[in-house]
Image (cartoon, grey):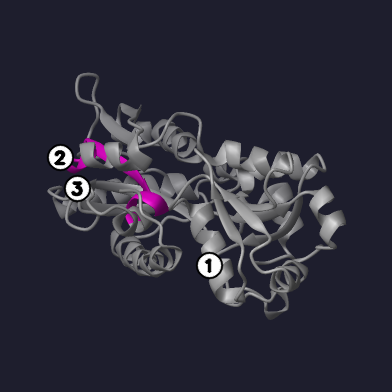
């Protein structure tokens, strides 16, 4: 968790200058009216994955033809993932996989309706997004907590007295809280809610003490003075002064295709989408909701998913969270 760069991240989500790459003039894979290329988002409309998918669909259409976004939410993303796992591997169906569906759910659910490794092939990582640890001014005034170090000290002096909200058992916020407990050696109580929005409202209203929330959704309340940001979580190593070394938990999402898709089609999709993600217009769009475009190769994305799955396997075990 980094505090030094936190304000910059909240105001603009500082990004390295992205070079603009020209789109390929022609592509063998083409979406047409009766057979468009579909990007399935396994969550409701309006969230970061949905907004990202729509931005990609618009930007890549000059190369790939008709590209549409289809929302198939349900069961923590499992419904949409399962749907795509059975789709034809012809390059016309992609899914926006995420840390939850690809790395957390495999350990959280006793049985998934899809195999994260065998049923999909990675195309590219799309973006990463920081999470932010927030409290209210009232909580800070009552406890004297003004930093992560203060929070840890207070929690150690009052074991089991603090709590943290999350969007539900096994959510990214839940896992972040469990990682904080594990790394800092503190005892705070998890309070799950049916979604991130009611969880955040519970903190603002004083019903709960703190929360790890997506930077994009928390930023407005931070600017309004309703919340105080103690630190932003990133994939970078945590500074020692924060008191929580190696706190590398963050949100990420990327595009996958059915496992039966030929490698040459995967490569073609990667070649079409990566320049779009590096284009200044896309960088600006993603910046507006707190995300950092992070395109890579299919092999790099695959290796990342494996690393993250191992990390969350440990965290789910520590938390004791189960959905079924």
Q: Write the start and end of the magenta stretch as one range.
A: 84-102
State how far apart marks 1 and 2 are (Cα). 34 Å
Residue 269, percent from left and from top: 28, 46
Q: Quadrant of residue 310?
A: bottom left
| Nearer to us in this view, 137 or 282 | 137
Please give the residue where the numbered disc 2 appears in the rendered image: 86
Residue 45 seen in the current view: yes
* Relative to 185, 113 lies left or right: left
Residue 197, percent from left and from top: 58, 37
Task: Inspect the magenta stretch and tell me whether residue 88 lies in it.
Answer: yes
Task: Inspect the magenta stretch and tell me whether residue 296 lies in it.
Answer: no
Residue at the spot 37% in from the left edge and 56% down from the top edge? 104
* Relative to 10, 247 lies left or right: left
Residue at the spot 73% in from the left edge and 48% down from the top edge? 11
| Nearer to us in this view, 185 or 313 | 185
Callout 2 secondary element: loop
Check residue 157 in the rendering and tell me which mark sits there, or answer none. none
Residue 12, percent from left and from top: 70, 48
Up-down relation of residue 179 to residue 68 (above or below): below
In front: label 1 or label 2: 1
Callout 1 secondary element: helix
Please give the residue where the numbered disc 3 appears in the rendered image: 265
Q: Quadrant of residue 71?
A: top left
Up-down relation of residue 317 to residue 106 (above or below): below
Please give the residue where the numbered disc 1 appears in the rendered image: 179
Of the numbered discs 1 and 2, the one sitting upstream in the chain is: 2
Residue at the spot 47% in from the left edge and 39% down from the top edge? 52
Residue at the spot 51% in from the left edge and 49% down from the top edge? 20
Of the numbered discs 2 and 3, the one sitting upstream in the chain is: 2
State how far apart marks 3 and 1 are (Cα). 38 Å
Callout 3 secondary element: helix
**Neighbours of disc 2 within 10 Å: few (<14), some (14-19), many (20+):** some
């Amino acid at each position: 968790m980094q505090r030094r760069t936190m304000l910059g991240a909240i105001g603009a989500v500082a990004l390295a200058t992205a070079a603009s790459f020209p789109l390929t003039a022609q592509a063998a894979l083409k979406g047409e009216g009766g057979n468009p290329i579909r990007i399935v988002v396994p969550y409701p409309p309006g969230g970061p994955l949905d907004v990202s998918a729509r931005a990609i669909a618009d930007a890549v259409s000059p190369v790939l033809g008709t590209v549409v976004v289809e929302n198939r939410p349900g069961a923590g993303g499992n419904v949409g993932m399962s749907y795509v796992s059975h789709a034809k591997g012809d390059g016309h169906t992609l899914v926006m996989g995420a840390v939850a569906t690809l790395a957390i759910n495999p350990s959280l659910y006793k049985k998934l309706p899809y195999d994260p490794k065998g049923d999909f092939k990675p195309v590219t990582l799309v973006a990463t997004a920081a999470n932010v640890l927030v409290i209210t001014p009232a909580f800070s005034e009552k406890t004297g907590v003004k930093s992560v170090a203060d929070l840890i000290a207070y929690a150690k002096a009052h074991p089991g007295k603090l709590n943290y909200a999350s969007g539900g058992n096994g959510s990214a916020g839940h896992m972040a809280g469990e990682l904080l407990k594990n790394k800092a050696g503190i005892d705070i109580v998890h309070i799950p809610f049916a979604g991130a929005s009611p969880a955040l409202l519970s903190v603002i209203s004083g019903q709960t003490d703190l929360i790890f929330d997506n930077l994009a959704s928390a930023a407005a309340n931070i600017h309004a003075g309703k919340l105080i940001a103690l630190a932003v979580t990133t994939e970078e190593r945590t500074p020692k002064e924060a008191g929580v070394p190696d706190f590398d938990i963050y949100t990420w999402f990327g595009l996958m295709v059915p496992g039966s898709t030929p490698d040459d089609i995967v490569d073609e999709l990667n070649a079409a989408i990566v320049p779009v993600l590096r284009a200044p217009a896309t960088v600006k769009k993603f910046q507006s909701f707190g995300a950092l475009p992070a395109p890579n190769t299919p092999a790099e994305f695959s290796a990342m998913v494996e690393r993250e799955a191992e990390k969350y396997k440990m965290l789910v075990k520590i938390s004791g969270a189960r959905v079924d």
